[in-house]
Image: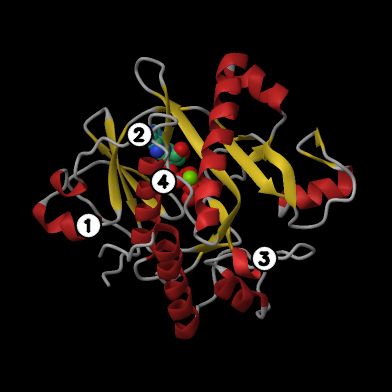
Amino acid sequence: MNSLYQSSIKSLPLLGHGKVRDNYAVGDDKILIVTTDRLSAFDVVMNEPIPGKGMVLNQMSDFWFEKLGHIVPNHLTGVAPESVVAADEVEQVKGRAVVAKRLKPIMVEAVVRGYIIGSGWKDYQATGSVCGIQLPAGLRQAEKLPEPLFTPAAKADLGEHDENISFADMESRIGAELAAKMRDISIKLYTAAADYAATRGIIIADTKFEFGLDENGVMHLMDEVLTADSSRFWPADSYAPDMSPPSFDKQFVRDYLETLDWGKTAPAPALPADVIDKTQAKYFEAIERLTGQKLKA
Ligand SMILES: Nc1ncnc2c1ncn2[C@@H]1O[C@H](COP(=O)(O)OP(=O)(O)OP(=O)(O)O)[C@@H](O)[C@H]1O
Ligand SMILES: [Mg+2]
């Protein structure tokens, strides 16, 4: 399995390194997104790659783009990543990159929650509502919500955390019409994906979508879609309410990190080889369970 911790594509202008992905400009209307094998936990990037993780995430996104293409247009161009880099850079993009339309990002992230967990659970315990949406009393941790909730977040500047905002705030930022469209499409995408995943024994507890506008103002789905990094996946067979179900992919890393006296700020501690191996196996299991197919190496 080829592993890539950080890409170095010299033939294209670098737009930036995210925590997990490296982005390059392809002309002025496209971008190359390379998903590396970096793993972040508690928002800190680990020092070791999880070999193949970037391929898994990239192929998960591709799988969903195709499955959900009838609901909303997306940023994929169909241009082969191998064709936009130099010959000696092809290995870095194989199976782990896409060439996307360069869109104008809508500066609100579309979070959809089907289950009450994480910050939503904290919010509910404190206020009885999630991001200002009143919920029935007596919900249990990790319980399925009566219907999926749309809870927008303002896209933060580099290095800062996204901030939950109300739907009214979203409307004032991007306009009522676009806000309603983003909400309705996001719920449709989540519902279709969650229904499919259920047939594969996976619960999608929540997820985050990003959208952008093309030169004609048409809204497109962009970024990564329904990956283990942008969503909470739970194996259905070990799901139970009243606890925080283990995440499909990062559980071994988180469990290990919790045994350390570490402040959850950079620099990250070293990960032992067995934690890396078990985590890698989990990613491979996730893509197989989801798509029914082995990772295309
Ligand atoms: N098709 C696209 N057109 C324009 N921008 C895009 C497109 N797809 C994704 N982006 C944006 O590219 C940016 C870089 O993505 P990336 O996720 O790698 O880094 P990040 O969001 O800064 O960090 P991280 O997600 O690791 O916290 C994001 O702001 C994302 O919204
Ligand atoms: Mg991002």
Question: Is the residue marked by circle 3 packed among few (<14), some (14-19), or many (20+) residues within 10 Å?
Answer: some
In whole angstroms, how far apart are the C-alphas of marks 1 and 2? 19 Å
Residue 174: image location, x then y, percent? 58, 19
237 or 31: nearer the eye? 237
In whole angstroms, how far apart are the C-alphas of marks 3 and 1? 35 Å
Question: Mark 1 belongs to which amino acid?
Answer: Lys
Q: Earlier in the sequence, mark 4 or mark 1?
A: 4
Q: Earlier in the sequence, mark 1 or mark 2?
A: 2
Q: Residue at x 44, y 67 (%)?
A: 283
Cβ of mark 4 under 8 Å from ligand 1: the answer is no
- State ligand 1's quadrant: top left
- Which label was assigned to residue 173? none
- Circle 2 sits on which residue? 75
Q: Nearer the viewer, mark 3 or mark 1?
A: 3
- Circle 4 sits on which residue? 64
Cβ of mark 2 under 8 Å from ligand 1: the answer is yes
Question: Is the residue marked by circle 1 packed among few (<14), some (14-19), or many (20+) residues within 10 Å?
Answer: some
In whole angstroms, how far apart are the C-alphas of marks 3 and 2? 34 Å
Q: Residue at x 37, y 49 (%)?
A: 63
Quick check: 219 above or below 204?
Answer: above
Quick check: 173 above or below 112?
Answer: above
In whole angstroms, how far apart are the C-alphas of marks 4 and 1? 19 Å
Q: Secondary structure at mark 2?
A: loop
Q: Nearer the viewer, mark 2 or mark 4?
A: 4
